[in-house]
Amino acid sequence: MRKTEEMHPLLAPDNRRDIVTVTPWLAPIVWETTFDSNLMDHIYKPQNITISATVFAIGKYIRFLQDFLHTAEQHFFVGYNVNYYVFTDKPEEVPNVNLAPNRKLNVVSTPSSNRWQEISARRMELIQTLIEEKLRNHADYIFCLDVDSKFHGHWGAETLGQLVAVIHPGYYAGPRSGFTYERRSKSRAYIGEGKGDFYYCGGAYGGSLKEVHALVSTCRVNFEADAAEGIEALWQEESHLNQYMWINKPTKVLSPEYLWQDFAPRRPEIKIIRFSGVVKNYAEIRPN
Ligand code: UDP
Ligand code: MN
């Protein structure tokens, strides 16, 4: 057999035959070994882009913020301009985490709520307002992340795209029929049997300001229209996000490496966990 360096790069053996690395609509699916991090930096660093990250820490969830920020400093877009936007009802409890130069933390005072479903639902409305009032001309890309999570590995420029979604770790190996989409046709988050592409996480998504604005404003309208008819989708904004991503295909899909959950069985396809949910006691931590 010829040495790899003698082969045309197009014909070099694919080192990941165990997973799909491109969607049927020709968007890349990002897995370990499918990208060259130095090359990505070579493309994006000279553009001097700014990445905004939104994170909500309402009520008891403030306890997750320290680890979230501390680990983001180690792994999330290291060397880039990053603006964190922390939405919290406890601004005085925001921890003092050392940030690298070119990284800033902005606190957005946010009212608390008695229902966790409402906190989740209101995130999209508040992200929409943030983009409209503060971010236009101040950020190129935005990622919206769950605070009850930590970074363990590299999350960088390979994740940039116009509309970016993460495949849920609980639903990447099983059949489509097991996806927990909203199945009641009266909801605007409805996805019929046999339909849908992947099951995406509500806990991490992003893209350009324009595309994320379109996503959050559409989901918000649909969520509120459902609410006016007394309907709440099965997984609240995650259900609406899945419906949106089915109609408006993401331009880049991130593998479950980008938001793992420890309840999901770890299969050999998962070579690295970059970001994962923190195990929490729901009964203790949620308002009700
Ligand atoms: N959240 C919050 N306070 C709450 C409930 C939720 O700040 O009382 C925010 C927080 O950012 C959290 C996100 O909403 O990461 C989603 O809620 P949760 O993580 O409980 O949902 P899960 O990931 O367990 O489905
Ligand atoms: Mn979460």
Image (spheres, rainbow, N blue to C red):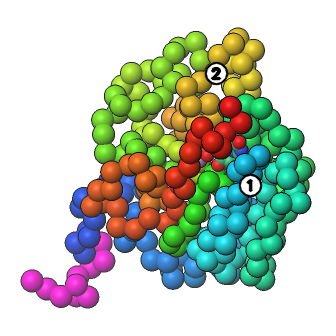
Residue drawn at x 56%, y 49% as measured from the top left: 280
Q: Is residue 25 magenta?
A: no
Q: Ligand 1 within 8 A of label 1's CB?
A: yes
Residue drawn at x 50%, y 72% as measured from the top left: 153
- State the extent of the magenta-drawn residues as a range: 1-11
Residue 48 percent location from the top left of the image: 73, 76
Give the numbered dot on residue 85.
Answer: none
Residue 115 percent location from the top left of the image: 73, 31
The reply to whether residue 15 is visible in this rendering is yes
User: Quarter holding the N terminus?
Assistant: bottom left
Q: Mark 1 points at which residue?
A: 62
Q: Which of 269 and 248 is in front in this view?
A: 269
Relative placement, left or right, of 258 versus 174 is: right
Closer to the chain start, of discs 1 and 2, is 1
Q: Ligand 1 within 8 A of label 2's CB?
A: no
Residue 183 percent location from the top left of the image: 48, 20
Q: Which of 221 and 230 is in front in this view?
A: 230
Gap between marks 1 and 2, in whole Å? 26 Å
Relative placement, left or right, of 260 versus 147 is: left
Q: Is residue 7 magenta?
A: yes
Q: Is mark 1 on a helix, strand or loop?
A: helix
Residue drawn at x 41%, y 27% as measured from the top left: 195
Q: Name the residue under label 2.
A: 232
Q: Which of 214 and 189 is in front in this view?
A: 189
